[in-house]
Image (spheres, grey):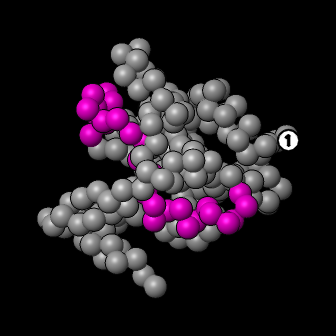
Amino acid sequence: MKNPLSEQLRLHNGPDGFNDEKDRDAVRNFFSIDKSWCEFVKERFKITGPVNELRPDPLGQKKVDLGLYRNNQLLGLIEVDHYTKWNPLWPSNYRWCHALVRKVKYWQGVGLPYIACTLNMQGDKMLVSTDEMQMDFMFTKKIKKVQLNGKWENDFFLEIPLRVAEKFGSWTPEELKRVS
């Protein structure tokens, strides 16, 4: 069954609304410039040897954005998005790392580690939740009004405290103070 929000999201985001190449490229860039990010992924995905490839759409189009592979074996899943109000500093009134409940179906029961990355508009800062964090905060599931195609619609989110979420990139000391 198709998600009832799919059509509204398509209309809101435009015909190319699922094109998150800039976000995918930003995450790829983190692998080349951020050692702490690389160590986090290595530990999270239990990587013991070299990784061959970061591929798009490991579960098919419009599901999970990236998959990390070694010798053609999928090691873990990476979802990417951006927060338009995080431009360039983290909004002072924003208290949560949100995870979309409708994305849970792509990692739950798959048996692979999952990382969800939210980037700022410049792609140089990242807030990260994992499948384990999302499971720990499943009780926080809330309906939130989002504006889609000029209309307010309900969507379900998990609220993960900012102090729990992982942070990578060029956060300012003031931002880190507010989110830790």
Task: Count how many numbered circles sit on residues in the image.
Answer: 1
Q: Which residue is mark 1?
A: 49
Q: Is residue 97 magenta?
A: yes
**Which residue is rendered at x = 20% and y = 60% of the image?**
147
Question: Residue 94: x, y in percent?
Answer: 30, 36
For this orientation, the residue located farthest to the front is 139
Question: Residue 5: x, y in percent?
Answer: 33, 73
**Which residue is rendered at x = 32% and y = 59% of the image?**
143
**Which residue is rendered at x = 52% and y = 34% of the image?**
164
Q: Main secondary structure of the magenta part?
A: loop
Up the image or down, 119 lies above or below 35; here it is: below
Q: Quadrant of residue 50?
A: top right
Task: Tell me the magenta residue range.
Answer: 85-112
**Which residue is rendered at x = 29% and y = 57% of the image?**
144
Q: Nearer the viewer, residue 70 or 7?
A: 7
The answer to whether residue 157 is left or right of residue 115 is left
The answer to whether residue 49 is left or right of residue 23 is right
Question: Residue 58: x, y in percent?
Answer: 63, 64
Up the image or down, 138 lies above or below 149; here it is: above
Q: Quadrant of residue 124?
A: top left
Quarter occupied by the C terminus = top left
- Residue 34 in sight here: yes
Question: Residue 149: x, y in percent?
Answer: 19, 67
Q: Nearer the viewer, residue 31 or 130?
A: 130
Where disc 1 sits, the SS reads: loop
Q: Nearer the viewer, residue 78 or 131?
A: 131
Q: Nearer the viewer, residue 85 or 121?
A: 85
Q: Residues within 10 Å of mark 1 (few under 14, many from 20)?
A: few
For this orientation, the residue located farthest to the bottom is 1
Mark 1: which amino acid?
A: Gly
Q: Is residue 164 magenta?
A: no
